[in-house]
Image (cartoon, rainbow, N blue to C red):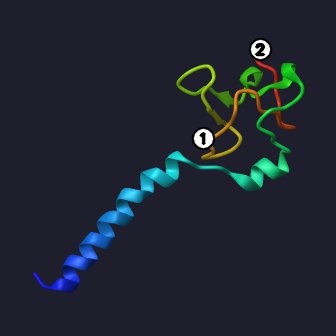
Amino acid sequence: MNQSRRTFLKVGSAALAMIPVTVIAAKNEGLRTAMKYVDNGPEADKHCVNCLHFVPGATPDAQGGCKLFAGDTEIAPKGTCTAFAKKP
């Protein structure tokens, strides 16, 4: 095996290993701005944890996701946005 092939395999393996890291820590900044999302909103009754679209994290205080913010995994339970829909 020659040196350029080894280098190619090393770089390719490193690039593949980074894919899950970028998916795990994802933010959808465009939608956050459009929906006026803030991490710690002033209206407690409209926090993300009370929203129909919120996907809870591992613990009650952990960040979760949002069904409307595709791929965004850093939604704060005490966050707020204009797309709030109260849980039934």
- In percent of width and height, residue 69 lies at 69, 44
Does residue 75 lie above or below 44 as drawn?
below
Q: Residues within 10 Å of mark 2 (few under 14, many from 20)?
A: few
Q: Amino acid at mark 2?
A: Pro
- Is 85 on the left or on the right of 21, as rendered? right
Precedes in sequence: disc 1 or disc 2? 1
Name the residue beneath numbered marker 1.
73
Name the residue beneath numbered marker 2.
88
Residue extending furthest toward the left: 1
Please tell me whether mark 1 or mark 2 is closer to you in this view: 1
Does residue 43 lie above or below 17 as drawn?
above
Which quarter of the image is occupied by the C terminus? top right
Q: Amino acid at mark 1?
A: Thr
Q: Secondary structure at mark 1?
A: loop
Closer to the camera in the image, 85 or 41 = 41
Which quarter of the image is occupied by the N terminus? bottom left
- In percent of width and height, residue 84 lies at 83, 30
Cα separation between marks 1 and 2? 23 Å
Q: Residue at x 36, y 61 (%)?
A: 16
- Is 7 on the left or on the right of 50, as rendered? left
- In percent of width and height, residue 17 lies at 36, 57
Q: Choose top left, top right, bottom left or bottom right for residue 72.
A: top right
Does residue 47 lie above or below 37 as drawn?
above
- In percent of width and height, residue 53 lies at 71, 30
Q: Residue at x 89, y 28 (%)?
A: 42
- Is 84 on the left or on the right of 74, as rendered? right
